[in-house]
Image (cartoon, rainbow, N blue to C red):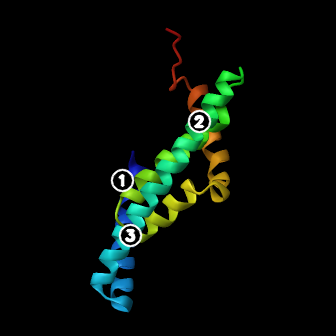
Amino acid sequence: MRWLLLTLLIVSALEIGVFLWIGGLIGPLWVVLLIFLTGISGIMLAKQQGIEAWNRARISMNSGEPPTEYIIDGICIFIGAVFLFTPGFVTDIVGFMLVIPWTRSMFKNSIRKLIMKMSGKSTIIYRRW
C-alpha cells in the first residue's frame, strides 16, 4: 500500500511538471485540447481492442481452448483504458502502450507473473458454481 501511495504522488508530480513544460512550449489551450484528443482517441482505440480481444476469447472458448492469452490482453486493455481516461501525458503514453497490440507484449509477461504470484499465495480464489 505504501508503494501505491508513493507511485501516485510521483506520477501526479510528474504529470504537473509535464503539463507546465508543454504548456510553456505550445500554450495552455493547446495542452487542454491535446488532453481531450488523446483521451477520446485512446478510449475509442481501447474499446475497439477490447471488443477484438473479447471476440477472440469467445472463439477460443467455442473451440474448446482456454482463453488465457486473451484474458491477459483484456486486463492490459482495461488498465490502458483507465490510464487513457486519466488526464495527463505520462499516463496517456503508458495507456497507449498497454492498448496497442505491438507494445502490449512488453507488459503481458509481468502481468502473467503477477497473476501466478497472487494465485500461489491464495489471494486469488477460484470457485466453480
> Helix or strand or loop: what does disc 3 sit on?
helix
Query: Circle 2 sits on which residue?
Result: 55
> How would you rate the neighbour count of disc 1 (Cα within 10 Å): few for under 14, some for 14-19, many for 20 or more?
few
| Quadrant placement of the N terminus | top left
Report which quarter residue 87 is drawn in.
bottom left
For badge 3, the amino acid type reads Leu
Q: Which of labels 2 and 3 is toward the front?
A: 2
> Helix or strand or loop: what does disc 2 sit on?
helix
> Helix or strand or loop: what does disc 1 sit on?
helix
* Proximity of marks 2 and 3: CB atoms separated by less than 8 Å: no
Q: Which of labels 2 and 1 is toward the front?
A: 2
At x 34% / y 68%, what residue is drawn?
A: 36
At x 45% / y 60%, what residue is drawn?
A: 42
> Vertical placement of 29 versus 13: above or below?
below
* Proximity of marks 3 and 1: CB atoms separated by less than 8 Å: no
Query: Circle 3 sits on which residue?
Result: 37
Residue 70 makes an appearance in the image: yes
Residue 113, position as x, y percentages in the image: 65, 40
Ranked by sequence position, the earlier of labels 2 and 1 is 1
- Outermost residue on the bottom side: it is 25
